[in-house]
Image (cartoon, rainbow, N blue to C red):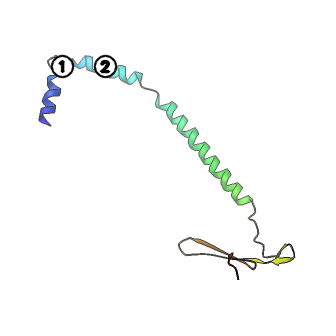
Amino acid sequence: MDELRRSLQAGDPLRHEPALEPADVDAMRRAVLAARPSPRGSHAIMLAIATSLAALVVAGAWIVRSTPAPAASALPTAVGERVISRRQLQFSTPGGTRVIWTFDSDFDRGEDQ
């Protein structure tokens, strides 16, 4: 690490130059600060983005709440000459996992009997 530091210091073209006067340092600092972008513009853009995102979240929540959930049907379904009855058992665990079991009266595993 010391060898790298020595190498960098040896190759520095301004190493032997005299230090800047305090007035020159202040003038350079003022020039840099004057060239920076206005923080007012960036705050306005961030506020516009945050407002748009909040409006999207509110609109999405309103759409989800206003859309009726599809009702589960336990009515028999006619297929050909047979009547197929499908029933569901739904529950949630304390951890939030939702379990849905569908019972089909016409379930066939595909094995020859």
Of residues 16 and 25, the one drawn nearer to the viewer in this rendering:
16
Q: Residue 89 at what x, y percent from top left?
A: 68, 78
- Identify the residue shown where x is 76% and y is 69%: 71
32 sits left or right of 94 in the view: left
Residue projecting furthest to the bottom? 113
43 sits left or right of 13 in the view: right
Identify residue for label 1: 19
In the image, residue 5 above or below residue 111: above
- Identify the residue shown where x is 66% and y is 56%: 61
Q: Residue 37 at what x, y percent from top left?
A: 45, 26
Spatial separation of the CA atoms under disc 2 and disc 1: 13 Å
Quadrant of residue 74 within the rendered picture: bottom right
Image disc number at residue 95? none
Of residues 84 and 110, the one drawn nearer to the viewer in this rendering:
110
91 sits left or right of 80 in the view: left
Image disc number at residue 28? 2
